[in-house]
Image (cartoon, rainbow, N blue to C red):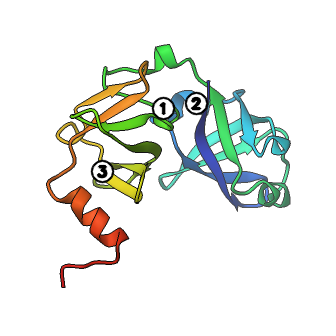
Amino acid sequence: MLLVVGRIGRAHGIQGEATIEVRTDLPDERFIIGAQLETDPKANGPLTIESARDHNGILLLKFKEISDRTGIEKVRDTLLLADVDMSEEAVFEDEYHVQQLIGCAVILQSGEKLGELTDVLNLPGQDLLAIQGEHGEILIPFVAEFVPDVDIEARTITVLPPPGLLTLHENEERGESDE
């Protein structure tokens, strides 16, 4: 399965190095010299890593196919994709890739469908599940307390929203407030 592992940022210097927004927990395995990465948009790749280095906490990559700063600026914001064997990826039982979760039905413990998962937002404090519900988007913290079960095979995620979250969300959709 192709997974997004990074995004090309600004050019660094004039030799064709690019800053990379890392989107993988395994950058040392994904960004090795000689690795070939697919791209989105597809027309910008594939790209082969010629060099990789850390510069003040920022990953810098040079690609064999791009020789200068102008070339990097042309592919800025391109997503980098790696072919990943999902069965070998999970180190812990409760680890998932966002691509495995997108599109799953989100249900309450009662079995009632809340909506469909559209995204997982990676925030500094914790990840949030973005669910498209009947009345719009609902955000639920992706922690065991509120998400007791994820069944990849059945494509379902069971949630226990914090008290008041769903009624608050419905009130906002109707334009009501607590004021």
Residue beneath the point at 35% across and 50% down: 128
Residue located at (84% from left, 61% from top): 70
Residue that extends furthest to the bottom in the rendered view of this protein: 179
On-image quarter of the N terminus: top right
Residue type for callout 1: Leu
| Left or right, residue 139 beside residue 29 | left
Q: Position of residue 61 (x, y in %)?
A: 67, 45
Q: Residue furthest top?
A: 87
Looking at this view, is 101 or 2 the one in front?
Answer: 101
Label 2 amino acid?
Arg
In this rendered view, identify the residue nearer to me: 52 or 151: 151
Location of residue 139 (image quadrant):
bottom left
Q: Position of residue 42 (x, y in %)?
A: 80, 40
Q: Is residue 142 left or right of residue 31?
A: left
Residue 167 is tagged as: none
Q: How many other residues sit within 10 Å of disc 2, few (<14), some (14-19) or many (≥20)?
A: many
Q: How many marks?
A: 3
Residue beneath disc 3? 140
Q: Secondary structure at mark 1?
A: loop
Locate the C terminus and report the quarter of the image it occupies: bottom left
Please state which amino acid type lies under the numbered disc 3.
Ile
Given this view, does label 3 or label 2 mark the residue nearer the observer?
3
Percent coordinates x, y for residue 136 in the rendering: 43, 59
Q: Which residue is mark 1?
A: 26
Q: Secondary structure at mark 2?
A: helix
